Structure formats: structure tokens, C-alpha cells
Amino acid sequence: MHVRRILEETITRRPVHLTLIDPPKQTAKRAEEIAAAADGLGTDGFLVGGSTGVEQANLTETVSAIKEVSNKPVIFFPGQSKVFSMSFDAVLFLTLLNSRNVDFLIRTQAQSALILKKLDVEILPTGYLVIEPGMSVGEMGESDLIERDNFWTASGYAVAAEMLGVKYIYLECGSGSPVTVPPDMVRAIKKVVDVPVIVGGGIRTAAVARQLILAGADIIITGTVVERHEYKQRLSEIIKAVTE
Ligand code: 1GP
């Protein structure tokens, strides 16, 4: 599977929706149910990972559970733990652009790069930028959070990352955030970069997803929505708003 080709071919036609599944947040059985439902509702693929509590066992079980019920791309979303599964189709290889800690900028990546290269796993080079409020990823990633109205600084980071060669810019305001990345910030960044822009954090309604798409987001990530007991209707509306 060539994930970058799949994503980019889809983006030429319409925006992409990816479902984030955080392994410690549910059992593998429940992850399988969520993946089957999301696949049926038209999500384009899965991100698996999270900032805390990801262990080898829950990661491997979650990836296998998703693979049982979906043929869509399953992409690793790395957090702090040093675990991995060979069943991933690709790795979102992130540099946390606005971190104060060199570990999140490049040092951790340097520690895993040779292994990933040897494993011949597909790499999706991504500049990850954390916007206020940032939630736990902002805190754990020791980010100098971008203020919500500071489009100039956000655009500067995005263009610098593009100049360094990343293939995606990921604007994140944190899982479970009460607000999303401001659509006008997405619009400002889309004006200055050519690579696809991924947006995540706090997207819980179709209307909000639609605003981000209209602002130019190429890929929308939702996570928390599927952690609720009754999520199918909501997820279906969001996926429709993104992909139709
Ligand atoms: C992925 O952090 C997001 O970028 C997921 O955010 O859990 O708020 O959807 P939610």
C-alpha cells in the first residue's frame, strides 16, 4: 500500500477524513467495532496513537483489530512511548515545530530513524504545530503554543517546515480541546504553503468540520467523537461534511 499516493490522489478530488484511535482509551474489541463503523461510514483511514498510555500490547492489539475489519490505511501517530507495530501501513513522522525540547524536534526521531529505514516502512514527513489551547500534547510536547490570532507566526512555522521538505503540515489544538484551530488560521496557512494541511483537535460537529474544509483543510482528524458511547450519527455527519 502506498499511503501517500492514496491520500494525495484523494485530496485532488475531495478532502480526506481520518479516524484517530487512541489504544489505551478502549479495548481492542471496541476499537474493532469503531473501525468497522468508521470504515462503513466512509472514513478514509485510521491514525493510531496518543500522548500517554500507549504500550506495545495495546498498540499491537488495536492495529490488528482495525486490520480485521478495514483495508484502509492504518497510520502510526507517535507519542511519547517507544513502541511500534509492523502492521502499520505508514508512520506520520512528526517534528513538533514549536517545541522547546529538542527531543520532540529531532532527537527522538534520530533515535528511531535507522530502524524505520531498515524496516522499510512508509514515512509521511510532517511538520506538527500546536495551537492554543494545546491540551495535553501542548503540555507534554513542551510547546510554545501559537496564540489563536497569531497567523503570522503560524504561517512562518508552516513555510519554514515546507522549505525543510515536510510533505504535510499538521495544525493541532489538542485532543478534547473545547475549540478547534481557527478557520482563519487554516486559511492564512493555505495561502502560503503548497503541501496538504491536516487539522485536528476539538472537531466534534459537521458544521465545524465544514468550516475548516471551507477554509482549505485537506485532511480532517477526529478522535474524541468515537470515544463516546453513541457516536455513529455524529461521526457519519462529520465524515459526510468532509468528504462530500
Ligand atoms: C488529532 O488531537 C486530535 O489531531 C484529535 O482531537 O480528540 O479532539 O478529536 P479530538
Image (cartoon, rainbow, N blue to C red):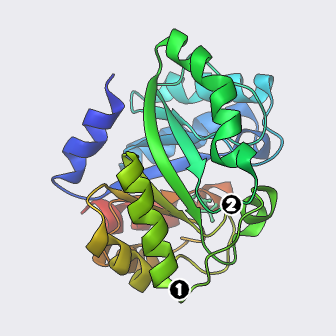
Which amino acid type is shown beneath numbered disc 1? Asn
Question: Is tag 2's residue or tag 1's residue first in the polypeptide sequence?
Answer: 1
Q: Is residue 12 above or below residue 86?
A: below
Specify whether residue 44 is in view. Answer: yes
Q: Nearer the viewer, residue 191 or 7?
A: 191
Residue that lies at the very extreme toward the bottom in this rendered image: 149
Under 8 Å from ligand 1: the CB of mark 2?
no
Residue 197: image x %, image y %? 37, 60
Which amino acid type is shown beneath numbered disc 2? Arg
Residue occupying image coordinates x 77% and y 41%? 80
Q: Quadrant of ligand 1?
A: bottom right
Identify the secondary structure beneath mark 1: loop
Residue 138: image x %, image y %? 73, 64
Residue 150, numbered label? 1
Residue 24: image x %, image y %? 79, 41
Placement of the C terminus among the 4 image quadrants = bottom left
